[in-house]
Amino acid sequence: MSAVIEEATRIARQFEYSPEEVQRGVKEYIREVEEGLSEEGTTLSQIPTFVTSVPNGTEKGLYLAVDLGGTNFRVCSIDLHGNHTFSLTQSKIMIPREMMTSGSAKELFLFLARQIESFLRIHHNEHFEAHLKRKIAGTAREEDLFDLGFTFSFPVRQLGINKGTLIRWTKGFDIPDAVGQDVCALLQEAIDELNLPVRVAALVNDTVGTLMARSYTSPGETGTFLGAIFGTGTNGAYVEKLNKITKMAKIEHSDYDKSTGEMIINAEWGSFDNHLSVLPTTEYDRQLDADSNNPGIQMFEKRVSGMFLGEILRLVLLDLHKSQGLFKPASGSDVFIPESSSLYRQWGIDTSLLSIVEADKSKDLEQVKSALKDHLKVERASENDCKAVQTVVHAIGKRAARLAAVPIAATLISTGKLKEELVDIGVDGSLVEFYPNFEGYLREAMREVPEVGEAGDKKVRIGISKDGSGVGAALIALVASKEGAKPQL
Ligand code: GLC
């Protein structure tokens, strides 16, 4: 075996995540669930969302939704048809990197409101103009406002259905003056400054949106139990019994409907086990965390989600490059990688590279070779190099998918959900959608948890829930609009 493959294999072994570790992870997760439901400021936030029921597919109406949570900002209008289907119009814009890290909260929210304005001008101009005329004439009416669901996929201390203060930024965002502020009020303020006919009716985490969207569209009678994202970040939301959320008594909050006896909890599982009592840790995980803008936080997410898997891979490849001459030419030939290669840039590797590399089952690894060229400007990678890369990618991706089983299995166990015939789970995100066999590895690890076992395979239905952040947000805006609250500024 060539030295580079041998070393890649040795590193890959460090990413193995055994059945015993999965089981220990599940135990610790259940402990953190209990803790998070009873206290504030715990590692697993277990945020009450004030959404107390899931849809059944008969909901109707036209709503706006916006989504801030990763690389893009999306604005959409959603027409819920009331028969499990909907139509959606949307626009998407990339958030300028400077805006994510060096702007002020005011600049960011005005930028968002401007995108809503241009969306309305393009797709709902008549309504917009009519509102402006009425506003000038002093006859503007509350009922002419669009209700908007604001998908804001960061940890928020939620105080009501459309009220919540930002706890901390994640996924590369860092705008310090927004922390501690009510993000719905910030958005409403910017919207009002531009005179838009829009009321921010609901604050929604993308996982809650995913859960709601899946429940609206999913076949059969069973309401959805859990919504999970495995994309740029990772997180989950699930239906919890109200009487188990004992910290509600300690939280200052607005009124909500208690009749269902349930509430959706946003777990913020990206921060599961920040103290690293059970999570597997390699030297690459350590380095990634130390170089990140939030060391010691989102430790689970840093081992599982798209934003970080590329960076783990990059650190391993750099190591192999230095120690074993990966991507280095045989003596005398040209240099393979230019300095501008994203191999040398922090966060330079996108998860899509991992998905392509993992998918190549050919003998000569032609797709790996051309992906290395496209993504990293590596010219003429040797077959051994390609094999070494694939070995490492496989190990990183498989560990992520097996880790992903931990919060899902633990939530199923802690809620007693496995006693039921069928449990429906909605998932979304680039990893679960595009990384080959992500669900397969996840299910394999779930089977290794004795309380889930083989039976889990039949009981647990996992379905992709596209556009959760649009449709789901619209559904929550619908519920909230009945309550008629306007964010207080
Ligand atoms: C991060 C955010 C969380 C979000 C997840 C998926 O973990 O903190 O709120 O749900 O990413 O986008």
Image (spheres, rainbow, N blue to C red):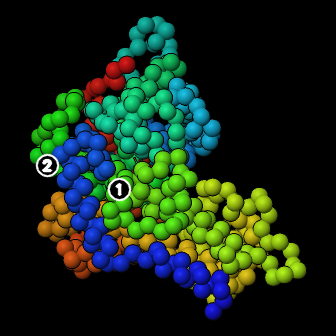
Would you place residue 218 above or below residue 422 in this image?
above
Query: 156 above or below 206?
Result: above
Labels 1 & 2 near each other (Cβ < 8 A): no
Classify 10 Å Cα crowding around label 1: few (below 14), some (14-19), many (20 and above). few
331, 229: nearer the viewer: 331
Q: Is residue 250 left or right of residue 10?
A: left
Foreground residue, 435 or 224? 435
Picture layout, residue 370 above or below residue 218: below
Query: Which quadrant of the figure contains the N terminus?
Result: bottom right
Q: Residue at x 19, y 53 (%)?
A: 34
User: Real-space Cα distance between discs 1 and 2?
Assistant: 25 Å
Q: Position of residue 218 (x, y in %)?
A: 31, 59
Dot 1 or dot 2, earlier in sequence? 2
Q: Position of residue 61 (x, y in %)?
A: 34, 38
Q: Residue at x 52, y 34 (%)?
A: 175
Q: Which residue is mark 1?
A: 275
Q: Residues within 10 Å of mark 2 (few under 14, many from 20)?
A: some
- Residue 85, can we see it? no
Asked whether 15 or 47 is in front, the reply is 15
Q: Amino acid at mark 2?
A: Lys
Nearest-to-viewer mark from 1 and 2: 1
For the point 53% across and 65% down, which residue is it?
284
The single residue placed furthest to the top in the displayed view is 137
Q: Amino acid at mark 1?
A: His
Q: Secondary structure at mark 1?
A: loop
The residue drawn where x is 50% and y is 18% is 193
Q: Is residue 32 left or right of residue 153?
A: left
Q: In the rendered image, is residue 445 in sight?
A: yes
The spot of residue 104 in percent (x, y) is: 55, 28
Q: Quadrant of the C terminus?
A: top left
Residue beneath label 2, please? 244
